[in-house]
Amino acid sequence: MKKNKLYWQIPLLVLLVVGTIFIARQQRGEDKEQDVQFLHNEGFMFGTTYRLTYQSGVDLHEEAERAMKDVDAEFSMFNPKSTVAAINRGEKPTLSRMYKEVWQLAQDVNKDTDGAFDVTVAPLVNAWGFGFKTGQQPTPSQVDSLLKVRSELDFSAIAKGYGSDQVARVFDSLGVKNYMVEIGGEVVTRGHNPHGQPWRIGVNKPVEDPENVELQAVLQVDNAALATSGNYRNFYYKGGRKYAHTIDPRTGYPVQHELLSATVVSKQCAMADAYATSFMVLGLEKSKALLQRHPELKAYFIYTDEQGKLAVWHTDGLTIEDN
């Protein structure tokens, strides 16, 4: 009887020992991970700055920058050797997998937003931007002409987000669990920050003084991507209300609605980037309607209300710290 009882106890003892060893090893692994320092890299790419913060035993700046340069080689309008620069010169370069991927995403968002997102809008943006500064705005015939041509590509409203995604993929492939990638305000996060807390990303308040940078709110971005679109300091006034200098690629003219800033949280930064730009064209109410079709997207909007004061609207599911 005692032997049978002992036989039943042996598996339990083995299980207890194995479990104890597993927990001890896991604890040692966690302690070892906590000992690894966070590294910080900064630089300039895509005509803007970038910041990388990641927990790693080795410096991965070279690998991350290589990923960004690969994106720049495809989509930069300022790199004469890029694919986009060649297309804008009328050439027909061989299209890479990366170019086709981003082009397809741009076309998908274009269709989903009824043309509010358009990578061929650059000549119109340039024409109106110059006109706002000089007071000599494009004539209706010039606008019509630019609407018809659409021969120049500009991926700036999606390339920085895609670049952030690419750096994130590099970190993921190298086993980095905790990081933040930020390129020109387009962000991808994983894990936790150096304080062991969720990553916190600030949303700027639309103010006219370039020296006065204020935060409207701080969002917790947990294993996700964030992008913000907004002409924070390019406004014009009409009827006592403030409007952003955003060109509607469907009409060729500046939009007239109250939305001043659109922040989008998504799984992909390129997606968040494209939709944030689209919302600045669509305006508050049409953007709300589109978001009902996309529960996977979260948004934080800053707009002017009927009294001309700043107001905020956001989707459910965001963790917001009011500033």
Image (cartoon, rainbow, N blue to C red):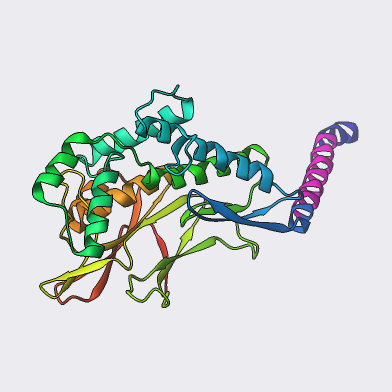
Magenta stretch: dominant secondary structure: helix
Q: Give yes or no for residue 22 being in the magenta stretch.
A: yes
Task: Identify the residue at horizontal 22%, vertical 55% (top origin).
Answer: 128
Image side of residue 55 versus residue 144, left or right: right
Above/below status of 31 relative to 304: above
> Would you place residue 295 above or below residue 150 in this image?
below
| Quarter of the figure with the N terminus | top right
Q: 102 or 200: which is nearer to us?
A: 102
- Residue 27 on image: x %, y %: 77, 52
Q: Is residue 296 visible?
A: no
On whether residue 281 falls in the magenta region, the answer is no
Q: Quadrant of the C terminus?
A: bottom left
Instruction: Say whether residue 58 is visible.
Output: yes
Q: Residue 254, position in %: x, y?
A: 18, 55
Q: Pick whichever, 5 or 109, lies toward us.
A: 109
Q: How many marks?
A: 0
Q: Which residues are magenta?
A: 9-30
Image quadrant where residue 95 sits: top left
Q: Position of residue 104 (x, y in %)?
A: 36, 30
From the top left corner, tell me how far across and down residue 310 is, in percent: 26, 73
Nearer the observer, 263 or 294: 263
Residue furthest out toward the right? 3
